[in-house]
Image: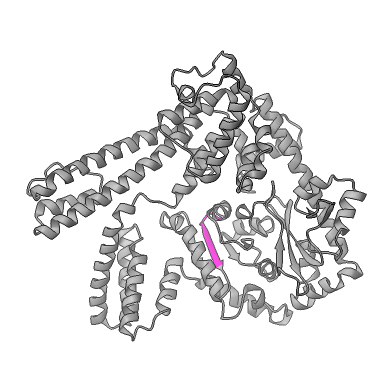
Amino acid sequence: MELQKRSFTEVVLDLAQRYQIPVRTLASEQKQALQARLSLQEQLYEILAIATRFYEHALRQPVGQDAQDYLQRQRQLREETIQQFRLGYAPPGWQVLYTYLVEQKGYPPALVEQAGLILPRSNGDGYYDRFRDRLMIPIMDAQGRVVGFGGRTLSNQEPKYLNSPETLIFKKGQLLFGLDKARQAIAQRDQAIVVEGYFDVMALHQAGFPQAVASLGTALSQAQIKLLLRYTESKQIILNFDADKAGQRAADRAIGEAADLAYRGDLRLRILTLPAGKDAADFFTGDEATLAAQQAAYQGLLDQAPLWLDWQIQTLVQQYDLEQGDQFQQASQALSELLAKLPNATLRSHYIHHCAELLGRHDSRLTLRIEEALRQQVRGHRWQGRSQKWQRPADYNLRQAAEEQLLRLYLHCGEYRPLIRQTLQARDIEFSLSHHRWLWRQILAIEEKHCAGLPAPDDLYNAEWPLHSPTETGTQLRDLDLVSHLFDRLNEAEDASLLTPLLHLDETTASSLDRPKLVIQAAAAALERIAVEKRCRCLLQSWQETVALILRQSPATEDLRRYLVLTNSDTEIDDISGVAPEGLQRLEQLRRDYYRHRKYLQQLDQQRCPSLAVIRDYS
C-alpha cells in the first residue's frame, strides 16, 4: 500500500482476485449484486483494452499515416512516447470498430455501448462508431487500465476533442490523465505538476518531468486533488495552466477547490506561469540540441513558482492601474476581501503588510497608511462575514453523501427500510437534492403499488412500528426488489447519471453497508446538522442586525463591546447590563437560542462520529 499509494480496500480486493481468495463481507444477495457489478466492470475493461490495441494497430497502417505525421512532426513526439501512452487512430467509416468488436469478436452491442465506444442510430436501426477519423488517446486509471478515450480531430471536424461519455468505470472528475505513469515519479520527487491537456503531459514526460498529470478538460476538483495528495509526502502540487485568460480562469477555479485544504495546511499549492502564448507542450521544441537548456529553464520556473496566495495577489494587482484613484480603491477592496478569508491571524497580518507594500509601491509613509486602511477593511469584511462562518462549500457534498447513504441502504438493505422511515420522520428530514427527491417519490410509488395493505405514510413512519415487522405487509416491504423496478423508470429522470450509481454496489459502497444502524445514525445526524448550522447562521445574522440597530440609537458601551466575543469565540456571555433596554430582551433571546443550537450541534457530532469516516469518504 505504501509503495503504490493504494487504499487498503483496493489492495485486499486485488490480492483476493489474484489468488482467488473469497472475501466474505456481504450478505448473499449483496454479494451477488457486487459480483454482477464487478463482472460488468471486468467486461468493460476487456472491451476497452481490445479497442486500444485496435486503434494502436490502425495507427501503424497506411490509413493512420496522417495521424503519425501529426504526432511526430507537429507534436514532435518520439516513438517511445507514442508507445508509452499507447496512442492510436480511429479510422474513418461509421462501423469499423463496431464490425471488429461485435461481428468479429462477438461482444454484445449493448455492452460495447456501455463502454462508450458506439452509439445507437436515431431511427433505432443499429449502431455506429463514436470515434471516427480521430487520433485516439487512451485514458487510464491509476492502475493502468484503459477506462475511456480522448479523440482529437485531424481535420476541421467538430468538436476538436471528443471524450468518452461517463460510464460505470469512467468518471472524469475522479481521474487524472497520466497518473498511472506519474504516480511513482510524484512520490520520488515529492511533487505533482498539473497541466491542462493530454499533449502537455506527454511533452513533459518526454522532456524528463514524469510527475505531470492533466485534469481531463475539467476544472481540477477536490477529489482529484485528494487523489494526488496520496502520492506526495510534502503535499506539494504545482499548477501549470496556459498563460492565456482561459488558463488563468482554470487556475482560479482550481484555487477555489483547493483553498480549504491549503488553509488547513493539508496542501502546498503553487502556480507556475509560462511565458505568454506558451503552454507546456510549446515550451519543449523536441530538439535534442536545446533540450538540456529547456529542461533547466523549466526546472527554474518550477523552483520559483509562487504559493497560490502570492500568485493571486500579484495577478489581482496587475489588473488595475494604481495611478487611477478609482482603480486603486477597487484593488484595495478586492485585496481586503481576499485577505479576510485567511483564518490565521499571523498569516493575515503578514499578507496585509505585503499588499500594503504593493499598493504603496514601497513608499514607506504611504505603505503605513495603506496598511492601516487595509486592516480596517479586512476587519470589516470579517465582521460582515460572521454569519457565514458556518457556511462551508462542503455542505453540499456532505448533504449529497448523507442522502446517498440513506437511499443506498434503503435500496439494498430491505430489512432496514422501516428504521430509515422512522428516522426521517423523527428528525423531520426530507431529501433536498432534486434527483434524490425524484428517486424517493418513485420508491414510494413502487411500494404503494406492490405492497398490499401498506400503511399510510404517517403510520409507516410511526416509531412503534417494529424494525422486523412480522406482518405480511412488512415482509413485502422488506423483500421488494426496488432496484429492478427503478431501472424501468430511470429513463424518466433528468439526472439519471447521478442516480445510476445508487442502484449498483462496488467494493467501496458495499463495504459501507456492513454497519447499517451506525450509517443511518451518522447520515441522519449529518443532514440534521446542516439544518441546525443554517439556523445558527440566521441567529448570528439577526444578532448583528440588532447590535447595528442599538449602535445607531445610542453610543457603544463597554458591555456591548463585550458582546463581540459571541462572534469570535464559543464563550457564553452572562453580563448584559448597560445595553439599551429596547435591545436587551432581543439580544438575550438570540444569545440563548444560539448557544442552545451550538450545544445540539455537539450532540449531533457525537452521533456522527461512529461512522463519520463513511460519510467523509463521499464528501
The tally of labels here is: 0
Observer-nearest of 275 and 306: 275
The quadrant in which the N terminus is found is top right
- Give the residue at x 40% y 42%: 530
- Which residue is pictured at 61% across the width and 76% down the height? 296
Q: Seen in the image, is 336 located left or right of residue 90?
A: left
> Is 238 one of the magenta-colored residues?
yes
What residue occupies the far top of the structure in this picture?
470
Image position, residue 449 (x, y; %): 62, 27
Q: Nearer the viewer, residue 76 or 505?
A: 505
Q: How is the rendered protein coloured?
A: one colour
In the picture as drawn, the residue positioned furthest to the bottom comes out as 323
Does residue 3 show up?
Answer: no
Residue 211 spot, x, y in % from top left = 63, 62
568 with respect to 523 (left or right): left
Above or below, comparing residue 245 to residue 239 in the picture: below
476 w.r.t. 219: above or below: above
Magenta stretch in the rendered image: 232-239
Q: Quadrant of residue 436?
A: top right
Q: Residue at x 25, y 48 (%)?
A: 569
Asked if residue 163 lies in the magenta stretch, the reply is: no
Residue 11 lies in what quarter of the image?
top right
Q: Is residue 463 visible?
A: yes
Q: Position of residue 134 (x, y in %)?
A: 79, 66
Whether residue 40 sits left or right of residue 514 in the image: it is right
